[in-house]
Image (tube, coloured by chain):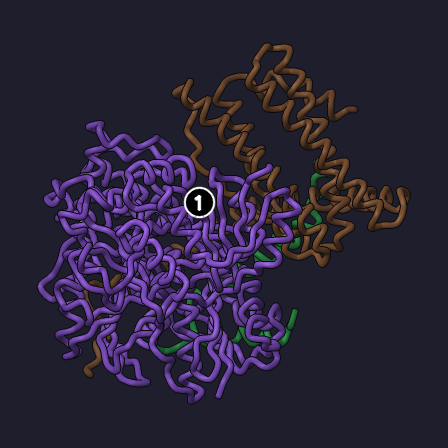
Chain colours: A green, B purple, C brown
Amino acid sequence: MNIGGRIKTIFSLIGHFLSPSKWVLIPMLIILLFAGILLWLTNGLSYIAPFVYSLF
Amino acid sequence: MAIVLGISAYYHDSAAALVIDGNIIAAISQERISRIKNDSTIPIEAAKSVLSFARIKPEDVDLVVFYENPFNKLERVLVNLLRTFPRSYRQFPRAISSQIGSKIWVKDTLSERLKIKREKVSFTTHHKSHAASAFFCSPFRESAVLVVDGVGEEDTTSIWYGNGQNLKFIQSIPFPHSIGLLYAGLTAYLGFEVNNGEYKVMGLSAYGSAKYLDEFSKIINIENDESFTLNLKYFSYFTDTETGFGPALEKLLGPKRNKNKPWNLNSEEDKRYADIAATLQQVTEDILKRLANRALKITGSENLCMAGGVALNVVANGKIAMQIGKNHLFIQPAAGDAGGALGSAIIGSIELGDKRPTPLKNCALGLPIETDKVKKMATDLGLSTKLLSDPAQTISEKIEANEIVCFLHGRFEWGPRSLGQRSILANPKLEETKDELNLNIKKRENFRPFAPVILGDHMDKHFEGQPDLMTPFMSTVHHVKKNKVEQLKAVTHIDRTSRVQSVDENNSKLLNNILHCVNKKTGLPIVLNTSLNGPNEPIVASAQDALLFFMRHPVETMIVEDQMISKKGL
Amino acid sequence: MLKILFVKFINFWVWRNPKSMAGKLYKFSLAEYGSMLDLMLASHSTLSGERSSMYLRHALDEARHSDLFRDHINYLADKYPEVKYQPEVNADIDNLFLRMPETDFLAFAYRGEKRARIQFAVYRDYFKKKKLKKEYELFAQLVHDEFEHERYIWNLLQELTGSKKSALVKTWKMAVWELGRTSLRRGRKLSNFVFTLTTIILYFISMPIALSIILFKRSKTGWHRETKI
């Protein structure tokens, strides 16, 4: 995975939603940010989930 | 002088297309390689196939153009999910997961998996890709372009003006008002699969009459400026992606049809569904004719190119052609989302200074069939093989004897139609042939029609019309002449229409020869031509696919170029 | 052994009525179709012409099995109104042949065929006991085919790995890999559940943003963004 490329994509996405003509969309960045974090965390959960099962 | 790869993916049918120095070199739908119908995954295998066909290394590619802008799409998806708050809560996690989990990273995914520098990957827009695929493949120097589909980033319908190397956006109708989604919603209501069953609705419509126009006037409103508005209470495509229609539609039209129930068009119940299909078809045709008129009027052009999934409605295309003149309408054969790959590759090529491609004459843009491989594998499977001195002659003999023949020749087709490269050929005279194909080979609804292929210079003797810009690609319908219906029972639909393909020496030499031989033997220069695939399978591409199909279905003969494969001795 | 006992134990529940039977057969039909796709990919991708034909022949069997299951569902649908017709089957491909060396793929396939043969034999015997002839014949045919597949793959695996011992080691390696895959799949199910739940909470927290969209960004109708030629 090209981390530099992925960071560029994140900046392009932020740029898209920060456009002054789309001010209504700016708060959506917050939703996207949280959803991204959730996706990242829960994807990680896939790998530790078998151990989580053992807790129950 | 540039090498440009166009990619479409993630929604319906993904594809890759390669344009070198302004020439279309290859174009392949991912489903043909992956063998998953309407495969929408990122078409890495298709992209690798077009590159290896042209012997191009990934690092030699100058530009990769993705057919739409993922950020604009994300914006539309997010805005609509929030606009329909709180009803869309079930769709929200799925939509967010697919958007930020994969779709927005398309530049990175293409770069990493194709091993092409990220800087070489760019985006265009969905409807521009469609418009480019239609206009730049057409024979017109200047033309109006009409794009009608479900939805792109935001637009569902758009009008463009093409002139030489230029393509200019004129106006559009945004989501959620969409002819494509109207048709898709009713497709689901009629018990067919969305994105795969729309053409079944079109076939079914001929069995009904448009009795539900009053009800439909509540569903869709057409304005004086030819724009249209859907009454959204009947639809649910932003809160339920599986069905697309809401309970209000069932209140208006009656209960939806049970998805898997076999069709019986003699029953009152199924006749009602056929009437609904007929009404939908008529409304769609009416809107498309109005949109076509508007596109011509505001651009001042006498030519029209069409693309987008709705442009695969061949019955509507035939009506539009009647209205504007048959040689003034061009439909790009892969009018659906796959076609966006071709359009985006051409856009990239022109941006890098190349000329627009020469008009599309032939759809054989896929990979060639490996005859030696088929022969060897057929022998390994215990099938018998025979080298033919004159394949056209042998095929015509079999057609005359009412045999059904699988036929593979050259590179496979671009677009959803079999045009003689991967086809099942049969005698068009007998209705039993149609039943045999529908019931035992294609295993599909018995109301579905089959298409004929005819020598172009004989067309007006059997059909009400001459070859035009669409007939080589099966993109329109013509009426069978009244006195010929008896002779063409297997390829005449109940409304006397036929999705005819015209052939001449320039667009398919071998098929042209076959039709000449058939004409000598039967007095008819016509053969039934249907796609070489089983139910819900992509059309055959490779040697293995061909043999798998042949072994699984009750067909006795398969002809691959000059090799005849048969089941004798099995 | 434990697995056989378990399959025997839940037989009464799996085959309790025609609808439940159709559901189970549909899952088998899907699995066989998916195997067919993977074997077609193997046939396309292997460097050996001989093995390409072998995989194609195997793919043909898998396709036939998928059709047999589907046909039996439709036979049940003819008899019992509660069973839905299944005109076609769609499955996804795992692209296994592209994700692992050919010998690993074979070891995986060998384990799958063996597992299926054992499971189908239990069903065959169950239907024989119940005197359900059609179902008995269906599974008897499948057991026979799975045994043939198991045999040819095992021979091929020994040939490609060089010895019986190396082939065995491969199957053990794949057993570990499968264990990891099963765990990951279970993990994904859990993570999908957590993601869905938390994202729905996020959705409802976003209500003020949703209201501002509803107020200030109404959906448009008619033509827009008009440009003159």
Q: Residue at x 74, y 44 (%)?
A: C108
The residue to which callout 1 is attached is B536
On screen, residue B205 above or below B51: above
- In front of the other: B399 or C22: B399
Q: Residue at x 39, y 56 (%)?
A: B418
**Coordinates of residue B8 in the picture (x, y in percent):** 45, 66
Residue B227 in view of the camera: no
Q: Residue at x 89, y 42 (%)?
A: C164
**Coordinates of residue B187 in the picture (x, y in percent):** 30, 45
- In front of the other: B488 or A30: B488
On screen, residue C81 above or below B113: above
Q: Quadrant of the C terminus of chain B?
A: top right
Q: Residues within 10 Å of mark 1 (few under 14, many from 20)?
A: some
Left or right, C2 with respect to B19, comes to right
- In front of the other: C211 or B41: B41
Kindly indicate the quadrant of the structure image that contains residue A27. Answer: bottom left
**Coordinates of residue C83 in the picture (x, y in percent):** 43, 24
- In front of the other: C8 or B431: B431
